[in-house]
Image (cartoon, coloured by chain):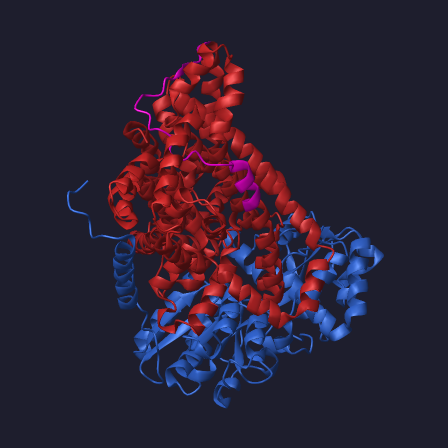
Chain colours: A red, B blue
Amino acid sequence: MLHIHRLPGRRLRARGLRRGHPRRPRGLIALSLLGTTIAATPLVYLVVRAREAGWSAAVETLAHPTTLPLLARSLGLATVVTVASVFIGAAAAWLVVGARFPGRGLFAVVAPLPLAVPSYVAAYAWVSAFPGMEGFWAAALVLTLCCYPYVYLPVAAALARADPGIDEVSRSLGAGGWRTFTRLKLPYLRPAIASGALLVSLYVVSDFGAVSVLRVTTFTRAIFTSLDLGFDRVTAVVLSTVLIAVTTVLVLGETLIRGRHHNGLTPVQRNVRRARLGSGAVPAGMFMITLVTLAVAIPAASIGYWTVRGAARSVPWPDIVEAARGSLLVSAAGAGLTVLLALPIGVLAARHRGTLPTLLERVTWMSHALPGVVVGLSLVFLSVNVVYPLYQSTSMLAVGYAVLFLPLAVGAIRVAASHSPLILEETARALGKRPSAVFATVTLPLAGPGVAAAALLVFLTCMKELPATLLLRPTELDTLATSLWSQTTVAAYASAAPFAAALVLLAAVPTYVLSRHIGALDNAGL
Amino acid sequence: MPQKPSSQSIARFSSACLALTLTIVLTGCSSNESTAGDGEITVYSGRSEELVEPLVEKFERESGTKVNVRYGETAAMASQLLEEGDKTKADVFLAQDAGALGAVAKEGLFSRLPDELLRQVPRQYRGSSGTWVGVTGRARVIAFNPETVPESKLPDDIFEITEPQWKGRVGIAPTNASFQSFVTAMRLTEGDERTEKFLTDLRANDVQIRERNGVILDDVDAGRLDLGLINHYYWYEKQAEIGEDKVNAKLHFLRNGDPGALVNVSGVGVLEQSGSDSDARDFVSYLLSEEGQRYFAEQTYEYPLTDDVSPADGLPRIDELSPPDIDLDDLDSLQQTIAMIRDSGLTN
C-alpha cells in the first residue's frame, strides 16, 4: 500500500531530473552548510584543545580505570530511560490518539506537559517531596518522566496522520489485529519511535541537572566535575570527544532503524477511527492516571507547596517578571535563529537522498549530547577569537542554542516536509516553476505547521537550558533558569520555587500549543 | 499558487531572514567595554547574587561607580576567564575559593594589587604573587559532642582520628569540596604517601561517610557521631536556625599548622588589563573595608580577614588560628586529590 503511494512521486521526480534540473540542489546545500557548520563549531574547539593537551594526556584520561565504568553507567541509564520512555510514550500516544476512553481529551492536554519541566526542577521537586531520594534508579525514574514526551509527540503525530484505510484493508484481507499491528502499524511508526528514542537517549547522556541533584555520577557529571575541581579543561575536552563518539553511534543506529522515510505518502482526509477499549478501558485509564500523577501532579504539587510556603514570606514579583522577560527574549532569539538554520537542512533531508544531504542532516546532532558547559566554553572560545563584538550578546547566546538544539528543529521540519505531498511539488516543477519558487510557494506553506512545531519545541527547550546560558548570556541579563539557579545555590526551596513555577508555567504554553498541533496536523490531513 | 512565477527564492528568503537576524544581532551587541576610571566596572562573581548584591548596591551608592555583575559557578567562571584570556570583559573576579583564584593567577591573568590593599590581609590568606587577596576565611574544625567526648580526650592532631579509640566514631564528607581542599593541604604539607596512608587508615578505622557538612554536624549534635570534620560556619548557621544555646555540639580548633586546621578563603583579584582602573581597586578596597568585612561576617559567619572586624561570637581571632603553612594558590589542582580519595575507597 505504502509503496503504491510512493512510486508515482519518485518516477516523476526522476523524469524531472532527466529534463535538466540541477542534479544537486546547490542553493539548498549551501544554506544547509551554514547551519551544519555552526552546529559543528564545538568540534573545532575540542580538536584545538585536545591537540594542545597532546595525545598522551588524552590517552591517559581515556585509559583511566574510572572512565569505562562512568561510560557504562551513562549508557546504562540512557538505555533504561530510553526503553521505558518508548513503551510509556508510545502506549500513551496510542491511547490518547487511537483509543476511546473517559478523560481522553484531558489526557491529551496533560500527557506532553513534562516537556515544560527542566530535569533539575523535576529532580528538586521529587527530592523535596521525598528527601533522601537518590541514585541510579531514582534518576532513571525522574528522567523517564521528563523524557517520554519526546516519544509521545512524534508517535501521536504519526498515529494522527496514519491512513485508517490501511488497517481496514489489512483486516479485510484476513489479517488479525496483532498481525496488522506488527506488519503494518509498527513499521509505519518505526521512524517516529526511532527519532523519539534518539532524542531521549541523547537527553539522558547529556543531562546534568537530574543526575547532579540525585547524585549519580555519569559521564556528563564527570565532565562538569573535572572543570569544577581542577579547572581541568583537558579532561573535560577528552571526555567530551567520547560523548561525540557515543552520539555518532546512536545517530547511525537511528538512521538504520528509521529506514527509508515514507516520502510522498498521500494525505489522508479521514478522521482516525478510535478503538473501543471495552474492558480494557479501566487499565488504560489507570495507566494514564498513574502516568500523569507521577510526571505532572507530583512535581506540580511539590513546586506549588514550596511556592505557597515562599509566598508566606514574599514573592519577588519584579524579579520574576524581569527574569521572565529575559527568558522570552533569549528563547525567541534562539528559536528564531535555530529554525532559520534548520529550514534548508530539514527540507534537504526530506527531499533529497544521497550521502551529502544525509551527512549534512546527521552532523547537526554532533553537539546535541555535549554538556552545555562545554558548548558554552567552545562558543566563548569562538566568539572571543573570531566574532568578539558578539561576545556576551543575546545573539551569541542564540547561536549557542542553535548549536545545542538544531537537530530538534531539523527533525520537526524534516518530518513535516517529508509528509507534505511530493506530488504537488513535482506538478509545480512539471509546470515549469524553478525549484526555488516551488520551495517558496509549495513546500514552505505545506511545511508551515512543522516549522511552527520546530520553533515551539526549540523555544521551550531554550527556556529550560542553564549551563550554556550562564556562560553566554549578556552580563546582568537574568532568565528564569538563571534566577532559579542562583536561588538553588543558596539551597532554599521556598525562594527558588516561585521562579520554578514561573518557568514551568511559561514553558507549558508552547507545550500546550505543541500538543494541540497534533490535532491541527490531523485535521489538516497532513 | 500565484499566476506569475514568484521571484522569491530560497536563497533570497533566507538571506532576508538572516539579514534581519544580523541586524537584531548587531544592535544587540553588548557594550560593557570598560576603560580605566570611567565610573563603571564589570565583576565576575562566583559568589551568589543573594549574598553579593546588597553589598554591591551599597558600594554603588557610596562610590558612584556602576557595577555590572555577572554571576556564575566559581569554577565555570574561572574556565571562562581562562578562555577569554586578555580579551575578558571582567575587571574583577570575586571567587568562592582560593583554588579558582590560583588557577587564574597561574595563567598570569591577574594584575598585581597595590601594597596598601595587600597589607590589610595576613600573608597566608592572599595569593603568593600578590595578585589576589582573601576576603573571608573558612576554617576547618572538628565538631564534637561534649556529652561523649570530654575536652581532654580531643585529638591534638588530625592523624589521631585514625587511631583505634575513634573507630567508627568520626564523620567526614569525602565528596565535599571543603574536605577535598583539606586533603590537598595535607598532600602539600605531609606529602602524598602519608596522605594516602591517612585516607586508607581512615577507611580501615570505619570512618562514617556523610554527604554534606551540615549532615555531619546534625549527627554530632544528636549524638549519632562523636566527632565530625566540618567548616566552622556550619555551627553558626545551625545556631541561627535552631536558636542560641540549642546546639549541643562544640567546635575544636587544631593547632601547630595541622592540615586539619586549614583556612580556605573566598577572594578577589583584578584582571591584568584593569590593573590601572581605580574603580576596580576601589571595589576591592571596599570588600576589605570595615563595612564590607562586617557584612560578610554577619551574613555568612565566615572569618573577616582584616584587623578591623572581629569574628562571630565564640570564635578564636584569626591571628590565633594556626593553619598549615601552604600557598593557597596551590589548592587549584584537586584532580590528584580526588583520585587519591577515590582510590582509598572512601567515595564508592
Instruction: Say which residue appears at 49% left-offset and 36% top-offset.
Output: A260
Q: As rendered, which of A194 and B54 lies closer to the eye?
A: A194
Q: As rendered, which of B32 and B70 lies closer to the eye?
A: B32
Residue A218 x %, y %: 62, 50
Q: Is residue A190 left or right of residue A58?
A: left
Which quadrant is home to the C terminus of chain A? top left
Residue B80 x %, y %: 49, 69
Q: Is residue B323 left or right of residue A166?
A: right
Q: As rendered, which of A91 and B208 lies closer to the eye?
A: A91
Residue A330 x %, y %: 34, 56
Report the number of numbered marks.
0
Which quadrant is home to the N terminus of chain A? top left
Magenta stretch, main secondary structure, is: loop
Judged from this view, the residue extending furthest toward the front is A19
Quadrant of the rendered image containing residue B186: bottom right
Highlighted magenta segment, given as a residue range: A251-278
